[in-house]
Image (cartoon, rainbow, N blue to C red):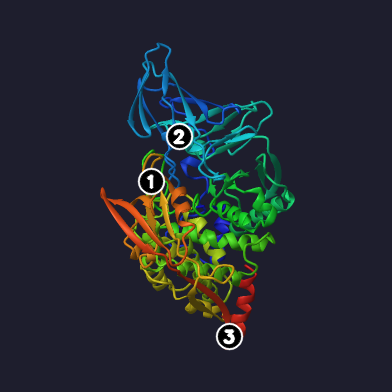
């Protein structure tokens, strides 16, 4: 996540046979949360909402939920996102209940679960959703914000739903300032301020960007796409036409991979003053600071491509255990994020490259060099298998593995890159990772999520080769991938050097890689240590320690820790006071440098003509 958007039966024919365990031509809209038809039942409640924004009040917005045809007592809950649990119930005001008889009441049963008593089965619930001030100049692009010129609302942060009525259709009325436009994946109605969702899943997966923003339309795969950009008052000019061209190219190349778009319409919700992104079935939330767009669009386009490709690889091609059903409880544990995130990272480079859009790395080789540098620099990547790293990637608390922090993004992209080479070699370059993605869409675009064994079976069918040893060694077990074994298939090898990290002036850089997070505004920050062999771990600090002070300066939040560490230089000493299991501990840490891994990929002197031809196609992203 961070994230990209994500021919069916024809792909099977191209593979020359059926994928083991596959079913014929599964419809990508098969899942109930993506149903096209409205599902009515006499036993279902009738639910509608009004979301009200006052641009003069940037601290929150008002919600109203009208429920009819329900039981005298029913439960309501706030959806928990399987990837980003922002625990937004912390910012909800009290819920009031009005009934025709005036005798309704509400009782909180859990953090995000309430019981409503409404004799007669009809009630109006009202509450306020607070929007906390963000601690940095930019905020995560998926979290609500209200400014005088616009707002991001809706999604799981805003709505309560009736537990047990997840398939009940709902309507949403938006009470917005005059002159504000709306961009959302919710279905519009004849009333320009009223929208429709066939299920709770669609409702909470469709954030609403409202305000004064720029808007463009384009077509990809004969499907309409809308790109909107929400500015901020101090934004800077940038080439918006180039940005929209990049989005158009990325969308067309992604649709070309799979042969069709898995949605009826798609909306890019781009925002200035935000960072990161979050995928949705028919839209994507993107942070695109105008200052970055004005200087270099490469990173923004890569982020957009990643989140957009997720509309296929994560939303439709879903790992088993991830986001199964609507719930207020944890539901994101899966062994498959190495494929969902890592392979999507690979396409975040390939799609812009194919589209001729702005790039982060000038060449495909330069991209893989940088990837391998990150991968090898993180000791956790070799200490924890990608399957195990996937299980804890979306844990409710950071550092679930202690003093290591493997990256499923980097692990998975390395594995995906090497698996692509295995497929190319086994099929004499007739098939590539694109064929694997098409086959995965056919096999796993319905209700069943994939496991590593499922990816392995589909890969074996695509390449017509035995891939079990590859998956056993690099996915199921811990270890650093032997990249030279696979780069050899391109006539290449990797030169890996480890040397003291230097700054722009050639001076050794201090190791300031100590991080923290804050469980609650009033709680002490908790440390995150990512290298068990680094100076901080050697000095006696560990993930989970509650930091109290650094060199006598009190630490109240992660910003304060960063401010205390930034002035430190090699040769200094950091005295860090922490609480560990309630006991105060002082760690004395001498500040030293650290090593940086550099990877250079070079041609083998004995590369064959076939390997050189394969390298040319691979380098072009084809």
Mark 1 to mark 2 CA distance (whole Å): 18 Å
x then y, percent, for residue 426: 51, 76
Q: Residue furthest bottom?
A: 606
Name which quarter of the figure residue 366 lies in. Answer: bottom right
Sequence order check, earlier mark of 1 and 3: 1
Contact, mark 1 vs mark 2 (Cβ under 8 Å): no
Instruction: Kindly identify which numbered label has been placed on residue 435.
Output: none
82, above or below 162, in the image: below
Element at label 1: loop
Q: Is residue 448 left or right of residue 271?
A: left
452 or 84, which is in the foreground? 84
Helix, strand or loop at mark 2: loop
Residue at (38% x, 32% y) in the render: 164
**Residue drawn where x is 52% and y is 48% of the image:** 27
Q: For this rendering, which residue is in front, 180 or 529?
A: 529
Indicate the position of residue 501 as horizontal and vertical percent values.
50, 70
**Mark sitting earlier along the chain (1/2):** 2
Residue topped by disc 1:
331
- Reading the image, the residue beneath label 2 is 167
Q: Splitting the image into 4 quarters, where does residue 282 fall?
A: top right
Specify few, some or many for label 1: CA neighbours under 10 Å numbering under 14, 14-19, or 20 or more.
Answer: some
Residue under label 3 = 607
Residue at (39%, 73%) from the top-left corner?
A: 469
In the image, residue 190 above or below residue 555: above
Q: Compute the Cα span from label 1 to label 3.
A: 48 Å
Q: Quadrant of the image for the C terminus?
A: bottom right
Q: Is residue 428 placed above or below 279 in the rendered structure?
A: below
């Amino acid at each position: 996540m961070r994230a990209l958007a994500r021919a069916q039966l024809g792909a099977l024919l191209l593979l020359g046979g059926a994928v083991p365990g596959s079913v014929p031509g599964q419809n990508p809209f098969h899942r109930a949360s993506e149903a096209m038809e409205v599902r009515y039942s006499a036993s279902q409640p009738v639910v509608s909402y009004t979301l009200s924004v006052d641009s003069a009040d940037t601290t929150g917005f008002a919600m109203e939920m009208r429920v009819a045809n329900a039981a005298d007592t029913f439960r309501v809950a706030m959806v928990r996102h399987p990837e980003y649990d922002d625990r937004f119930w912390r910012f909800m005001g009290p819920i009031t209940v009005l009934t025709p008889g005036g005798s309704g009441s509400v009782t909180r049963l859990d953090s995000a679960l309430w019981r409503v008593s409404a004799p007669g089965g009809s009630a109006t619930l009202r509450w306020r959703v607070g929007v906390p001030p963000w601690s940095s100049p930019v905020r995560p692009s998926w979290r609500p914000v209200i400014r005088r010129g616009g707002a991001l609302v809706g999604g799981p942060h805003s709505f309560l739903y009736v537990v047990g009525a997840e398939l009940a259709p709902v309507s949403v009325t938006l009470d917005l300032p005059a002159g504000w436009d709306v961009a959302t994946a919710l279905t519009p109605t004849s009333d320009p301020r009223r929208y429709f969702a066939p299920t709770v899943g669609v409702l909470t997966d469709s954030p609403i960007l409202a305000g004064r923003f720029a808007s463009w339309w384009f077509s990809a795969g004969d499907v309409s796409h809308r790109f909107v950009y929400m500015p901020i008052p101090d934004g800077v000019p940038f080439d918006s036409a180039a940005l929209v061209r990049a989005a158009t190219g990325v969308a067309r190349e992604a649709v070309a991979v799979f042969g069709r778009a898995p949605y009826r319409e798609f909306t890019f919700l781009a925002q200035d003053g935000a960072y990161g992104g979050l995928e949705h079935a028919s839209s994507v939330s993107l942070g695109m600071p105008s200052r970055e767009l004005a200087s270099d669009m490469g990173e923004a386009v890569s982020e957009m491509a990643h989140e957009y490709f997720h509309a296929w690889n994560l939303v439709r091609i879903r790992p088993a255990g991830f986001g199964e059903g609507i719930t207020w409880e944890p539901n994101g544990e899966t062994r498959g994020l190495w494929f969902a995130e890592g392979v999507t990272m690979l396409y975040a480079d390939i799609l812009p490259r194919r589209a001729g859009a702005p790039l982060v790395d000038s060449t495909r080789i330069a991209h893989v060099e940088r990837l391998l540098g990150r991968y090898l620099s993180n000791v956790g990547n070799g200490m924890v298998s990608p399957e195990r790293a996937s299980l804890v990637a979306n844990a409710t608390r950071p550092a679930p593995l202690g003093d290591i922090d493997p990256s499923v993004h980097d692990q998975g992209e390395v594995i995906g890159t090497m698996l692509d080479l295995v497929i190319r070699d086994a099929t004499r370059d007739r098939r590539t990772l694109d064929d694997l993605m098409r086959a995965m869409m056919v096999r796993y675009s319905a209700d069943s999520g994939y496991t590593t064994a499922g990816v392995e079976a589909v890969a074996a069918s695509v390449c017509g080769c035995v891939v079990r040893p590859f998956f056993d060694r690099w996915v199921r077990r811990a270890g650093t991938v032997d990249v030279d074994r696979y780069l050899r298939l391109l006539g290449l090898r990797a030169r890996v050097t480890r040397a003291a990290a230097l700054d722009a002036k050639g001076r050794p850089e201090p190791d300031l890689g100590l991080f923290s997070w804050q469980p609650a505004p009033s709680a002490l920050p908790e440390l995150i240590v990512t290298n068990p062999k680094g100076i901080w771990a050697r000095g006696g600090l560990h993930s989970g320690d509650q930091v109290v002070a650094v060199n006598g300066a009190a630490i109240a939040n992660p910003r304060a820790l960063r401010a205390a560490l930034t002035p430190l230089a090699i040769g200094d000493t950091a005295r860090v006071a922490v609480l560990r299991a309630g006991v105060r501990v002082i760690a004395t840490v001498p500040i030293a440098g650290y090593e940086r891994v550099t990877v250079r990929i070079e041609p083998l002197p004995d590369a064959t003509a076939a390997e050189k031809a394969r390298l040319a196609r691979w380098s072009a992203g084809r």
